[in-house]
Amino acid sequence: MAGDAFQKFGDSMNRAITKLSVKTSSSFEKSKIKMHIESLTKDVQKMLTDIGEEVYSLWLNGEYSVQSLSEKLEEIRQKKDEIEQLSAELASIDDRDNAILGTKAEAEQKAESVAPQKMCCPNCGSEYEPAAKFCRKCGYKLQ
């Protein structure tokens, strides 16, 4: 009897330690990725500003040429592609953590149990939220 209690306590502690370990390492990984995304986003904004200034300068001098800007535009596209890949990596980390910890299923169950039920108007039968005072379809007073 006492052995079962200690076993349950030990199992509970192991789960808590595993959960903490997964969340800590994931948090560190996600922070690094988010910082990298932020850095790339700032680079892209700076590059776009520089291109805008360059285009304006070329336009003022009557030397507008798309060819001179194509390298910079390609570099911007590459940075935006990298941002997209990093964002997908963030989502995969969340999915991995949810699979390991089983938190996604719990969150979905909670969301289903908390979701407000819709009511039907006694006059026309259209659905309405419980907080509604009048039916949107026929104007019937609900409360």
Image (tube, rainbow, N blue to C red):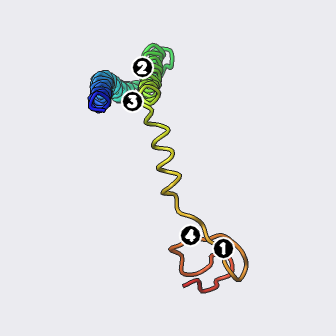
Mark 3 and mark 2: Cα distance apart in space: 18 Å
Q: Which residue is mark 3?
A: 52
Label 1 or label 3, whichever lies nearer to me, is 1
The outermost residue toward the right is 124
Crowdedness near tag 1: few (<14), some (14–19) or many (≥20) residues, C-alpha within 10 Å: some
Mark 4 and mark 2: Cα distance apart in space: 45 Å
Q: Which residue is mark 1?
A: 120
Q: Secondary structure at mark 3?
A: helix
Q: Secondary structure at mark 2?
A: helix
In what quadrant of the picture does the C terminus appear? bottom right
Q: Which residue is mark 4?
A: 129
Label 3 or label 2, whichever lies nearer to me, is 2
The residue positioned 43% from the left and 25% from the top of the image is 100
Q: Nearer the viewer, residue 37 or 122?
A: 122
Residues at discs 1 and 3 in contact (Cβ within 8 Å): no
Quadrant of the rendered image containing residue 44: top left
Amino acid carrying mark 2 in the image: Lys
Amino acid carrying mark 1 in the image: Cys
Residues at discs 4 and 3 in contact (Cβ within 8 Å): no
Label 1 or label 2, whichever lies nearer to me, is 1
Mark 1 and mark 2: Cα distance apart in space: 51 Å
Amino acid carrying mark 4 in the image: Glu
Crowdedness near tag 3: few (<14), some (14–19) or many (≥20) residues, C-alpha within 10 Å: few
Residues at discs 3 and 2 in contact (Cβ within 8 Å): no
Tell me, for residue 49, which label it has, or none: none
The residue positioned 47% from the left and 27% from the top of the image is 99
Q: Secondary structure at mark 1?
A: strand
Residues at discs 4 and 2 in contact (Cβ within 8 Å): no
Q: Position of residue 108 (x, y in %)?
A: 50, 44
